[in-house]
Image: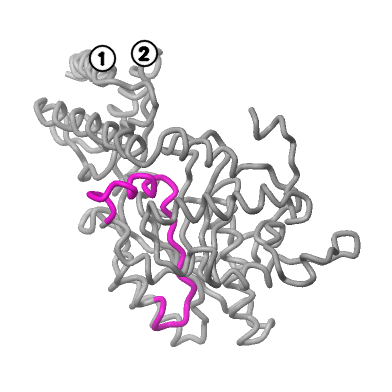
Amino acid sequence: MLSAGLNIVGFSWITSPAATELEMIVLDWLAKMLKLPEDFLSAGQGGGVIQGTASEAVLVVLLAARDKVLRRVGKDALEKLVVYASDQMHSSLQKACQIAGIHPENCRLLKATSSTNYALSPEFLSETISQDLTIGLIPFFLCATVGTTSSTAVDPLLSLGKIAKSNGMWFHVDAAYAGSACVCPEFRHYMDGVEEADSFNMNAHKWFLTNFDCSALWVKDRSALVQALSTNPEYLKNKASQANMVVDYKDWQVPLGRRFRSLKLWMVLRLYGLENLQCYIRNHIKLAKHFENLIAQDPRFEVVTPRIFSLVCFRLLPVRNDESHGNKLNHQLLDAVNSTGSAFISHTVLSGKYILRFAVGAPLTEEKHVNAAWKVLQDKATSLLAESL
């Protein structure tokens, strides 16, 4: 309410020094909570900026990477530029490629399988890059994910980062969902290898008690963003900006105007503090683990891919191992549970199987709610299985 009511339009430092400087401070705080490398802090060549969403974050770093490589190889090489990610990557990367003029056939979404728990295989990536180099294409951007949308898979950052570096590619890490969990020391290892990244993103509005929109993006080289996104019309010129004494966040994003988002994040960090935020995350993961244990006790169900954070991917096993029937059965179970109005679950498809997703993430969720949701699932499963006999 404060952020909206103050109605600050902080596109450049001169329009609101407080909004700009608070953003630099809170993103340095959050970077330190995540134990990000010092290269991402505002004291050096890098720094943080709050975007609206992870979709905007991946777009602006893709544009920065594109312009950086085109300055080296010539602007006519646009049609040769290639982007890489796993097929579990969020669809925002495809949209970013469309906007950035990357040819659709040069957006390589590499198949991830159950053998790697749906993480991107470094070997498969290396092979694909080699093939592309052989035919004269230019690999320039790699996006890895910490906590994919479908199943919260974690890509192996260290191995992928080394491949990116050896090929002169920009390496972006999307931790929109699971980045929040990495403020807990016991989950920080999922970010190991982030030191190889050129940019890193997490959404405070997903799992960090901050209301939408608040997507934190850090870059190691802010000049790459500024060169790709800067404009300098006469009516925005001022002494502080022209002397390069300040940060103008208008040059780190797509729009000109911007809200006072840093006030929201400042409020959360000051109000809760690190320990309370860690407890909040740990409680959700504990509740998801409890749900996973409930599933394990009922032989009619299976956990499809290992639970890492607070999402459980599971399904009702098909009668007589009939997979096509299994997909229909789980679709029916999803509809039956959601139509009760007492719980809401979502779905995905992994390796051709229709999978149910149980996500714990609301501030007021308790163990009794998880138990109640499980009872609804069991009851509806019993009815559906009786019908299918």
Q: Is mark 2 on a helix, strand or loop?
A: loop
Identified at 36% across, 27% down, the residue is 345
Relative vertical location of residue 357 with respect to residue 15 in this rendering, above or below: above
Q: Nearer the viewer, residue 258 or 108?
A: 258
Q: From the top left corner, tell me how far across and down residue 109 is, in percent.
A: 43, 62
Asked if the magenta segment contains residue 236, the reply would be no
Q: Relative to 42, is 146 on the left or the right?
A: left
Mark 1 touches mark 2? (CB < 8 Å): yes
Identified at 63% across, 53% down, the residue is 21
Inter-mark Cα distance, 1 to 2: 8 Å
**What is the number of callouts on the image?**
2
Return the residue at label 2.
342
Classify mark 2: residues with Cα within 10 Å, few (<14), some (14-19) or many (20+).
few
Q: Relative to 211, is 155 on the left or the right?
A: left
Amino acid of disc 1: Ala
Identified at 16% across, 35% down, the residue is 302
Amino acid of disc 2: Ser
Q: Quadrant of residue 304 in the image?
A: top left
Q: From the top left corner, tell me how far across and down residue 270 is, in percent.
A: 47, 38
Name the quadrant of the C terminus. top left
Name the quadrant of the N terminus. top right
- Residue with the most extreme right position: 234
Relative vertical location of residue 346 with respect to residue 134 in this rendering, above or below: above
Identified at 44% across, 87% down, the residue is 134
**Along the polypeptide, which appears first: circle 1 or circle 2?**
2
- Give residue 372's mark: 1
Q: What element carries label 1?
A: helix
Q: From the top left corner, tell me how far across and down residue 202 is, in percent.
A: 46, 50
Q: From the top left corner, tell me how far across and down residue 175 is, in percent.
A: 41, 52
Q: Nearer the viewer, residue 236 or 22?
A: 22
Classify mark 1: residues with Cα within 10 Å, few (<14), some (14-19) or many (20+).
few
Report the span colored magenta. 164-188
